Amino acid sequence: MPMTITEKILAAHAGLDRVEPGQLINVRVDLVLGNDITAPVAIKEFRRIGVEKVFDRERVVLVPDHFVPNKDIKSAEQAKILRDFARQQQLTHYFEVGRMGIEHCLLPEQGLVGPGDVVIGADSHTCTYGALGAFATGVGSTDLAAAMALGEIWLKVPESIKFVYYGELQPWVGGKDLILYTIGQIGVDGALYQAMEFTGPAIETLSMDGRLTMSNMAVEAGAKNGIVPPDEITLDYVKGRARRPYRVYQSDPGARYARVYEFDVSKLEPQVAFPHLPSNVRPVSQAGHVEIQQVVIGSCTNGRLEDLRLAARVLQGKKVHPGVRLIVIPGTQEVYRTALKEGLIEIFIDAGAAVSTPTCGPCLGGHMGILAAGERCLATTNRNFVGRMGHPESEVYLSNPAVAAASAILGRIAAPQEVL
Amino acid sequence: MNQLRGKVWKFGDDIDTDAIIPARYLNTSDPRELAAHCMEDADPSFAGRVQPGDIIVAGKNFGCGSSREHAPIAVKAAGVSCVIAASFARIFYRNAFNIGLPIFESPEAAAKIQEGDEVAVDVESGTITNLTRNEQYRATPVPPFMQEIIAAGGLINYVARRLNG
């Protein structure tokens, strides 16, 4: 019986020869993850279970990244709960401020996730790791607590949807544009409870950073996971990083899909999601005249080295528009350091940007770039819901880093070609 | 007989977790503090006016977005007895069961129930009765495994029982 890559990974972790969509299974987890918002609740629930120790101190990862460096007293108390728990449980992978990163940039970079893994995280963007050919999905704090105790989780095997992308991408078009376009086509619940499998020639030539961006936003279509079949690009990325053995799975010919979408993306332009849903997507050439007051380049969606390189190519020798605050946030300390060595940070500062230590801060309206009523922000982040980055009457637009950089220069939503 | 009964607050499609509990209040996980800001960016008057037992009725994809369990915690702590929606986002769906907030999926109920209607829900059978309009709707049956979690009193009790015999 042919299976998809998602079904194969789940079957292997459930100790079964085969699984079928709809089947409820208990799955062994290779890694569980929490952050400074979700883990405090999970730790409280974990203590109620009545076990002393987590199932494996090397497989429970805690990353304070949302409201750190601590934005206020209450946030400081939340982050301290993680720190104390990590020390008490002697967790191997607790990442402190100054040695950390945005969780979904950090874990792949540090080789903590690999092909064939099952990873659950109390953060909806845990689906990012699907880019490595892993099964990864977001859960809530109570599910995290149970998994910290058991080392397993119950899951319903999802149906898979196959996406095939044909054609060579235009300049300044990348993973962000492919996923925004896809969400625009299928809607914010277009893959509800289902697995998105990203395939085709355009994916085979897409960089790992671009793939991570795509899988990251699978949840914005309601998906359980978003997976890319591993190939040479995957193995090159994993080589020298992986801290555990990994296993490559591929979908069988004849595997069953709930739906198959085929997109010719050879003429695709950079995409922009308008307020207030990630599915409200238009090509940048049809954005019209939208003035912006803030631009954010960063986040678990687009805070990686390739993203900063793209932004720097556009910003080099240019100045940020007088009416715009540009905030650049490298996704990890390693990305920050490399960007510094490559001269990217200098380009940003010369252009008039603020550059920050890694944090999720502005993406979810936490800190480091909150919007006032009536303000508009173009961000390389993942959500543009009402009030997402601040006042309920502010607006968030989503794009790739090159469009964000061009827009910061012109003070309105713009294509990179307009400034180069 | 486990019956929930209350006045309906009606919301639209794709009500996201930022609307249910904005991230600016996530520097705490105290249910009472979260309840004070429940649904704030969808209806700022909600938290001040909601009565114990009231019911939220919404369209498709309720609870999309973030994994924050603070969302169902805020709804439950605000006194809402249950949520009825045409469909739920998957993480919200799991979270609601795990923390003991009853939720019911019924596209028909979501379409026909109006703001202010008086509604009663029979938890076991999933029968939704609209007392204002004298109509009945059926919710999608809850999978047996999830019924076990509810019967145990939530996921934590279920796991504790399993681990501690």
Image (cartoon, helix red, strand yellow):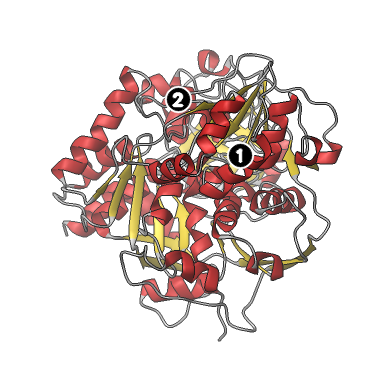
- Residue at (34% x, 37% y) in the render: A64
Q: Amino acid at mark 2?
A: Gly
Which of discs 1 and 2 lies nearer the camera? The answer is: 1
In this view, the residue in front, B46 or B142, is B46
Helix, strand or loop at label 2? It is: loop
Q: Position of residue A75 (x, y in %)?
A: 34, 24
Q: Tell me where residue A115 sits by quadrant.
A: bottom left
Q: Position of residue A363 (x, y in %)?
A: 54, 32
The label on residue A312 is 1
Q: Amino acid at mark 1?
A: Ala
In the rendered image, the quadrant that contains the C terminus of chain A is top right
Residue at mark 1 shares a chain with residue at mark 2: no
**Is A95 left or right of A9, judged from the image as shown?**
left
The label on residue A36 is none
Q: Is residue A418 above or below residue A233?
A: above
Q: CA distance from mark 1 to mark 2?
A: 50 Å
Helix, strand or loop at label 1? It is: helix
The label on residue B79 is 2
Confirm whether residue B130 shows in the render: no
The numbered mark 1 sits on a residue in which chain?
A: A
The numbered mark 2 sits on a residue in which chain?
A: B
Confirm whether residue A272 shows in the render: yes
Q: Is residue B23 above or below residue B83?
A: above
Q: Position of residue B62 (x, y in %)?
A: 60, 40
Q: Position of residue B142 (x, y in %)?
A: 50, 54
- Residue at (31% x, 54% y) in the render: A147
- Residue at (55% x, 51% y) in the render: A216
